[in-house]
Image (cartoon, rainbow, N blue to C red):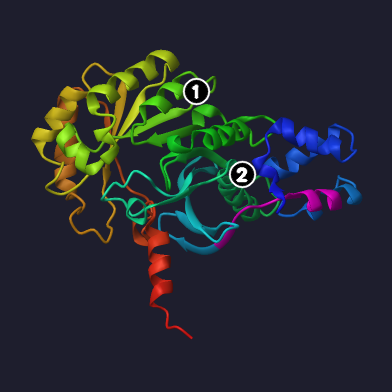
Amino acid sequence: MPKAITDLRIDEVDKLVTSLNEPSFRAKQLLAWVYQKPAISFDEMTDLPAPFRRKLAEQVKLHTLTPVHEVRAKDGTVKVLFSLADGKTVESALMKYSAVGDKHRYTVCLSTQVGCPIGCPFCATGQQGFERNLTSGEIIDQVLYFARQLKDMSNGREGEWISNLVFMGMGEPLANYDALWQAIEILNSPEGFGLSARSMTISSTGLLPQIKMLSKEKLQVGLAISLHASDNALRDKLVPINKKYPLEELLPACSDYFARTGRRVSFEYVLFDGINDSLAQAQLLAELIHGLNCHVNLISANKTTEQTFRPSPRNKILSFQQELKNRGVNCTFRQSRGQDIDAGCGQLRSRFASDKNRQPKR
């Protein structure tokens, strides 16, 4: 099966072009069609000779994803379930934010794995288990799919574009480090998608070796840690990787990340009713991160089939937030997007699989 062109690094695209006996400047034209236009087929690449386009179609695939289900929320969030070449499925979301001038900002929430190996009990993806890593091309193609959607919406005018990427979809991004980083380099490259590294954020449950690797990379992407608890006993239950990388090791790694990169770490804290949302736990959290240059994002939990983890009432979230602020913690209550379409990580995939299983056999 031909390799996807988005699985090739920029220099490998150069080599592909020369291997097909084409002048080297064709590589820049090809990359522009793949990442900046972005084309849906080789036939669209009209400034490339037809024989060259035919050879490309024989050598590489232009896409790795097929959309199989799409839902749209009242707040503008679009959630898409994609089928991969091997029949496995992943999901991504396009989130629409307030306009800057006459244009809106769009963030794409990306998956990096099919399923997830961490097994957080409150997470729909965690309940699905782990199947495999995505390739760099499968990660990039999620971005390009939505870029084409926005291009189509503009009807050929100078349209709205993707301003941010968050690797917060299915999977633990840092457990798929090589493919993740190759995708980031291509998405950042001026010859690729051309998005600033500072507009990208990686969410992790706290894989220490990879956090240390990330702190040494030249591209300064953002880091968000899925914390969800302020003591090891509770975090062991909510985020099982904590048993391997406990808080007393995780927090110094986050401090080191800031010292090396100059970028403050964000802590994601999903609030569950009666589990981690008491004022006492807010006080413990403030003590835990005291002195660390960071920001806390408080998030209302998404509903899943696991009834143990119910969303905290809004008044408890606001009280938790106020307690943190009273103790000098920078924090924001981040409203979950796409609540009316179950846009949380893994929810669409779970629902789609459930619906298929309920269909009568023929």
Q: At 24% from the left edge and 16% from the top edge, which residue is drawn?
A: 291
Task: Name which quarter of the figure residue 155 lies in.
Answer: bottom right
Q: Is residue 196 above or below residue 235?
A: above
> Horizontal placement of 271 versus 12: left or right?
left
Q: Which residue is mark 2?
A: 137
Magenta residues span 53-67
Q: Of helix, strand and loop, which one carries label 1?
A: loop
> Horizontal placement of 158 versus 232: left or right?
right
Disc 2 crowd rating (10 Å Cα; few below 14, some 14-19, many 20+) is: many
166 and 157: which is toward the camera: 166
Q: Of helix, strand and loop, which one carries label 2?
A: helix
Q: Residue 292 in the image: x percent, y percent? A: 27, 18
Q: Is residue 284 above or below residue 346?
A: above
Q: Which residue is mark 1?
A: 220
Q: Residue furthest left?
A: 280
Q: Residue 253 in the image: x percent, y percent? A: 33, 21
The reply to whether residue 144 is in sight is: yes
